Amino acid sequence: MTTATAPRSRRVARALGTGAPVYVLLAVLLAALALTDPGFYEPDRFLAFVKRAAPLVILAAGQYLVIVCGEFDLSVGSIVTAGVVVAAELYGSFPSAPWLLVTAVLLIAGAFTGLLNGLITTVLKVPSFITTLGMMLILEGAVFFWTGGSPHGALPTAFRQLGRGTAFGWLPWAVLACLAAGAAAVFLMRSDFGRTLVATGDSERAAALAGVRVARARTIAFILSGTAAALAAVLVGGFSGVSAQAGRGYEFEAITAVVLGGVVLGGGRGSVVAAMAGAFSLQALFTLLNLQGVSGALESTVQGLIVIAAVGLGAADWSRLRRRRTHPSGGEPS
């Protein structure tokens, strides 16, 4: 192996990092889907699968930004629900409202919710788990109070195009939105800000001593997570229509996808590409279970097993890595 090839190989390995297992898992699941359903890879059907996965992939990218800097965001599912319901109510009051304006309102509202989460967490020092759990309950209660459990209004065809329409007559807009969000997340994590998020999650004290404005970085991560949830709401509303349960469970699916991608809870390590691959893997697993006739009620059980197993394996691997860094010779501390 030449000296030029060796560093390149190390860079590839470092890029794969702890996400390597999820890429293998995704390949296995996609192969299993092909064996179970030979028509799965027909262009229309495969693109429909990606379209169904798109909201979760976008949520996983946003959730990754929060988790890698050492926090949690449990409010994303309720932001999805609130976004769908608010859009329907707005169209009920203003039927001729431009879809682009309504979409912008939802994105701004999602960003504002993320801002509140970030400020409460960083300024008031409320743990993010409690902050976002409280926000989830507030939004769910507000939606129920506003609608009485039955949303009014309907989403017009123009608004639903992003979730269910196609570009060029064959490529779903949801797939393009997923690609755009993924590319933006990858670009962000390769920037100085992305490295700041990882450094903050790895050691808040060390990052602060290095001049990182930790509170600002974490607040921006929450804002981006809220914006991603609002974009997912537009896709979900377009694909599924109006429902007071539109985003129910998405917060846990997003966390499961991120953990499945090898991202360490507590922050400091992980790849946003692996987190998005985790979302695709989760969607592929649910699709496979459905094709096998397994009850959808078991999806929560599967998610729970995945979280426990992935976190356990990740914690053990992280402990070994820290020991190697502290004791390069491989010995245990004296």
Image (spheres, rainbow, N blue to C red):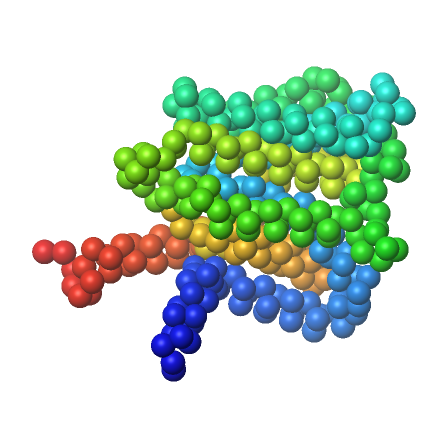
Taking the image as shown, residue 67 lies to the left or right of residue 29, namely left
Write down the quadrant of residue 96 in the picture. top right
Q: 137 or 50: which is nearer to us?
A: 50
| Residue at the farthest bottom position | 1
Residue at x-position 36% and y-position 35%: 212
Q: Nearer the viewer, residue 200 or 261?
A: 200
Nearer to us in this view, 117 or 150:
117
From the viewer's perspective, is 69 left or right of 224? left
Quadrant showing the N terminus:
bottom left
Is residue 59 among the parts visible in the rendering? yes
Identify the residue at image location x=39%, y=57%: 313
Q: Quadrant of the C terminus?
A: bottom left
Can the viewer see residue 282? no
Percent x, y of residue 108: 66, 27
> How far across and down, in percent of the image, does residue 70 sit?
41, 39
Query: What residue is at 80 percent from the left and 22 percent from the top?
Result: 90
Query: What residue appears at the point 44 percent right and 34 percent down from the top-left corner?
Result: 217
Q: In the image, is 176 to the left or to the right of 304?
A: right
Q: How many marks?
A: 0
Answer with left or right where residue 71 lies relative to residue 139. left
